[in-house]
Amino acid sequence: MPPSAPTATWRRVCEEYCSRLIEDLEQQVESEVESRVTAAIGARLHAALADSAGECRRVVAEELNQAVRRLRQAADSDELYAVLLDVTTPFCEQAAVFSIHERVARAERIRRSAEVHDGENGAASLPAFEFPVSQAAAFSTAIDTRDPVIAMSTPAEVSGQLVSLFGHRPDERVCLFPLHGGGESTALLYAAGELHAPLLELLSEVAGLQLRSWSVSGSAPATTTAVQSESRLADALVSISGSFAKSAEPENTSPAAPALPAAPRQHTEWWNLSREEQQMHLAAQRFARVKVAEMRLGKPDALRSGRKERNIYASLQPQIDPAREKFRERHMTTPTMVDYLHLELVRSLADDDAILLGPNYPGPLV
């Protein structure tokens, strides 16, 4: 007997309702599965990225540690330049090391990318070349300020020889990192292409410390331990040698009443300073470098005259005295502060010979 009309309608309604329930349930299941899978993949990805980042930091730290060790163990400047070019390979595509002497830059080591040369060894097969730094504004700025310089790769900035040698594009940027040897002769690292400037600056500073240690000792020792290097760097940051400060003051042979000893300033190693004190020291260093660079660039004739007469202070007193007063007001506010301005005057203007500052130079502020 066929079902009545109300029964057929009821069955159709139930089927449609069950169909919608099943469809909604499938969507909820799919959404829940997708959400859980996404969360699981995200957690795994986050863990993998964290592991990868940690491994990358470990690898970079090991490379830097090995690079610093090799730089400190260089036996002479020629080996130092070769090592510097080699250890910077992971951090820049193209590089060159220049020695600077009497305002002339001479290429000591060169490394070019595979796209530029056809398989030859850039460091060995290319002939050495040199040019006056006056022909390359970026070189001149880096040498005069002793700070890293970012420049456009144009002939006016880096010389036409380098533009041709490295195949620079007109819009390409390059970085120059000076190596401070402590005297007139110094060196410079030239980096181009994809590069990591902070790491290159760090390695250049280490190479410069090695050059400076040879300049001070008068020889190139075969090895220098990392502990000795860190000790010298810490002393330069937070203390002034008594003999170094004394050399800048004129001798007084006339008898006089003994002066009361001044209260000694607190001596604290760099790693024992608080973060705030370290920032204060770094700010004082930047102030000193900027002020002395302004003197070098703004009064080159007066500086040359002062060096020749062995009385730089007399030639640059209108610039030195205001800088000393500003340094005293802004930075001599903590017991651990060092007269970085005095250190920079001796290093940059007097080539590490405090006697050249002259008999009337008042000496360090502390």
Image (tube, grey):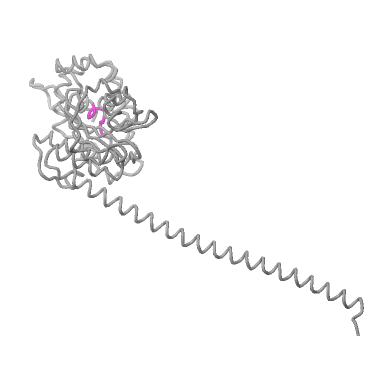
Percent of width and height locating residue 55: 34, 56
Q: Name the quarter where the C terminus is drawn.
A: top left
Residue 285 seen in render: no
Q: Is residue 365 magenta?
A: no
Percent of width and height locating residue 89: 27, 43
To which quarter of the image does residue 102 belong?
A: top left
Identify which residue, 191 or 169, lies in the foreground: 169
To which quarter of the image does residue 274 belong?
A: top left
Identify which residue, 170 or 224, lies in the foreground: 170
Q: Name the quarter where the N terminus is drawn.
A: bottom right
Query: Where are the magenta residues, as a range?
Result: 338-344
At x 23%, y 36%, the residue is: 110
Identify which residue, 179 or 105, lies in the foreground: 105
At x 62%, y 66%, the residue is: 30
Percent of width and height locating residue 37: 54, 64
Outermost residue, front side: 118
Percent of width and height locating residue 315: 22, 14
At x 33%, y 38%, the residue is: 197
Q: Main secondary structure of the magenta part?
A: helix
168 above or below 121?
above
